Amino acid sequence: MGKPIIAIVGRPNVGKSTLFNKLIGERRSIVEDTPGVTRDRVYGEGEWAGRRFILIDTGGIEPKTDDIILQKMRMQAQIAIDAADVIVFMCNVRDGLLADDRDIAVMLKKSGKPVVLCVNKTDSIGSLPPAYYEFYELGFDHDPIPLSSLHGTGSGDLLELALASVPEEKTEEDESDVINVAVIGKPNAGKSSLINRIAGTERVIVSNIPGTTRDAIDSRVDNEYGSFNFIDTAGIRRQSKVEDKIEKYSVLRAHMAVERADVCLIMIDANEGITEQDEHIAGIAHEAGKACIVVVNKWDLIEKDNSTTNSFTREISTALSYMPYAPILFVSAKTGQRVTNIYEQIAYVFNQSRTRISTGMLNDLLNDATTRHEPPSDKGRRLKIYYMTQVSVAPPTFVIFCNSVELFHYSYRRYIENCIRETFGFRGTPIRIVLREKGDKAND
């Protein structure tokens, strides 16, 4: 069994995301005083009294609404409720007990899950406000917990009660073999549709409205290829078009998702072809040193002949000339065409990014490379390369010791990199070469 799962639910704008961020100790959920900001489920980990737990933040529940996005937010919250071991039901003392709170309470009681009721924004020192006592009417088995999600007061009582509802024997699973995969791309490229196809459920809200996904969302998948944690991210727009304050947070979350990923799937809309923005997004993953796969989505919508795939591949290779190592897959998230091929490629490029080569093998390669193509010289002074060694993985990083960094021209560095790839592969991952002179510490 894994860590206990706690879901935070309630009406929009009662402070769920603020509590989520407080309990996991980082600003992962977007917090903004605007109803409906958190649209999908957001996962995080926390610890209380030596016990680790998984926390799920959810979009606010509107029990009765005709708005499509709000209806889907309710469905997402229901999925979180189904997945949780215990539910934290948050209300807001400043609004008092509302009809929507009563409807949500009925919904939660029907779930059969343990529920911890908390009343947020009870920040005043001394006696509780009169509106607090209204929440006893909801009929839960314990006193409503007065809480300030902003300051954290009452959060200890909340966690103590929540974790007491989960058996102690629910122990932590080994997560060391899970591959974290960030799905990145422009808005409406099909990232969420791919996640839902992969996860086999409507895990993330899918809409043709650009910007539907605002947070980075995690989905766990286990199959014969391994264990994967897929991170759906908000579409990354051109900086000049990022005007909405909330969307700026979303772009930051996408960058953070890349940082915590092992592999990045770079989604490209086949209808639009590769654009400058796609090049920029791919560059984020490349500069971060992440293993990458280019996924061309909506391939089912393209009229094809015998040269279509080759032509599209050449176009991508030209645009992404700085990352020729990245494999290219043509898929359809809508129909499922070739989606299963993604797992094998992820596992492959992940392993490539963690490959280690012995110093002896590297220097055999170096001797052969310098014999075939003599190092450059300048004004009678020739570059001398003493030896090469690998110092780290993810990305694979090599240190070359030489007599002069200035003589080590970019073209010769690229030649050595190509020799490394020809001999040892490293398909799907950037590699880095660090130059050192005698007496120098480092030169990237």
Image (cartoon, grey):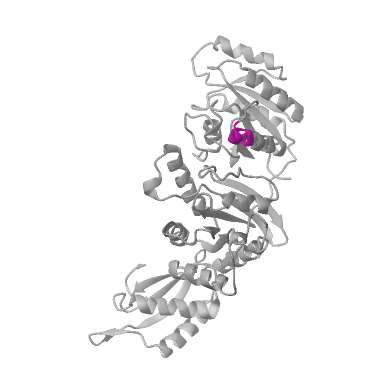
| Highlighted range, magenta | 67-73
Query: What is the quadrant of the C terminus in the image?
Result: bottom left
- Give the image location of residue 216, x and y in percent: 54, 45
Residue 276 seen in render:
yes
Count of numbered badges drawn on the protein: 0
Q: Looking at the picture, tell me which residue is in the foreground, 92 or 239.
A: 239
Q: Looking at the picture, tell me which residue is in the foreground, 334 or 263.
A: 334
Does residue 340 appear to the left or right of 291 in the view shown? right
Residue at image position (58%, 44%) is 207
Residue at image position (45%, 41%) is 247
Q: Looking at the picture, tell me which residue is in the foreground, 13 or 400.
A: 13
Does residue 15 appear to the left or right of 56 in the view shown? left
Residue 58 seen in render:
no
- Give the image location of residue 99, x and y in percent: 64, 18
Residue at image position (69%, 47%) is 201
Q: Quadrant of residue 51?
A: top right
Residue at image position (72%, 23%) is 106
The secondary structure that most of the magenta stretch takes on is helix
- Give the image location of residue 94, x and y in percent: 53, 17
